[in-house]
Amino acid sequence: YFKNLKAQGEIGRKKITQLTRYGTVLIASVQAIGVCVLLTSLDVSDGTGGGRYLVANPTMMFYFITSVILITGTVFVMWLGEQITNHGIGNGISLIIMVGILARLPKVAIQQISNLFSDDPNLATNPFSFIISILLLVGIVVFVVLISTGVRKIPVSYAKRIVGRKMYGGQATHLPLRILTAGVMPIIFAQALVIIPTSLASFFPNTGFGM
């Protein structure tokens, strides 16, 4: 179905974009409900047995307002990414995700370094595990970049031809074809699908399903 839509040109592309938007809203709705359930199950008690929760008495209005806010924010980010792409700046969604990662990077780095040299055994990080994590992180980034920018070179040879007294052609070159024409979008989509089980697990906080 999607292959036929892609073959229809501009009309098919608009239809695929529209279906992508609907799918985004559907996934955001499922995750929004999961976030609501998670907020109502978070125990913020001080250990005295009071049973205090972040949201003590959730109502249907709480679920509705929270879901609307989260879904609206998702739609706004999606629209903002499309505007960035349409203005030729780059892949809008990819840029937004990259900015989000870079914005959290200093805080995460400071926290990890603090845990590495912390005297608290509950917060201290094993130096060996820290080094392994850094190597895995760098390896994954390099692998993703190589796959996203990988090019397969198709050899092309031009036959020789004689025009008047001169000979033309006989050259050999190659035609570069990208291995992954969709860029990083499949990776982003896969990440969204991986988060879905976690969102579903949050519906049953006390059943051990999330484990």
Image (spheres, rainbow, N blue to C red):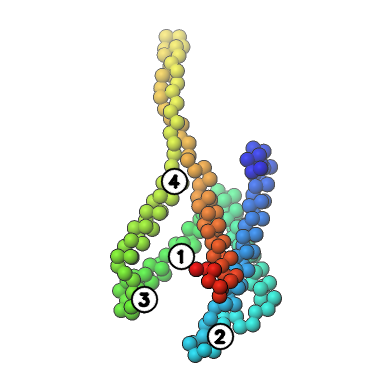
For residue 123, the mark is 3
| N-terminal-most mark, 4 or 1 | 1
For residue 103, the mark is 1
The image shows residue 82 at horizontal and vertical percentages of 60, 53
Q: CA distance from mark 4 to mark 2?
A: 48 Å
The crowd level at tag 3 (other Cα within 10 Å; few <14, some 14-19, many 20+) is few
In this image, 191 relative to 3: left or right? left
The image shows residue 64 at horizontal and vertical percentages of 68, 72
Q: Mark 4 highlights which residue?
A: 147
The crowd level at tag 1 (other Cα within 10 Å; few <14, some 14-19, many 20+) is few
Q: CA distance from mark 3 to mark 1?
A: 23 Å
**Residue plotted at (34% across, 58% down):** 135
Q: Name the mark nearer the viewer: 4 or 1.
A: 4
| N-terminal-most mark, 3 or 1 | 1
Q: Mark 2 highlights which residue?
A: 52
Q: CA distance from mark 3 to mark 2?
A: 25 Å
Please name the amino acid that badge 3 sits on.
Answer: Leu
Q: Nearer the viewer, residue 162 or 68?
A: 68
In this image, 109 relative to 6: left or right? left
Q: Nearer the viewer, residue 1 or 167?
A: 1
Please name the amino acid that badge 1 sits on.
Answer: Ala
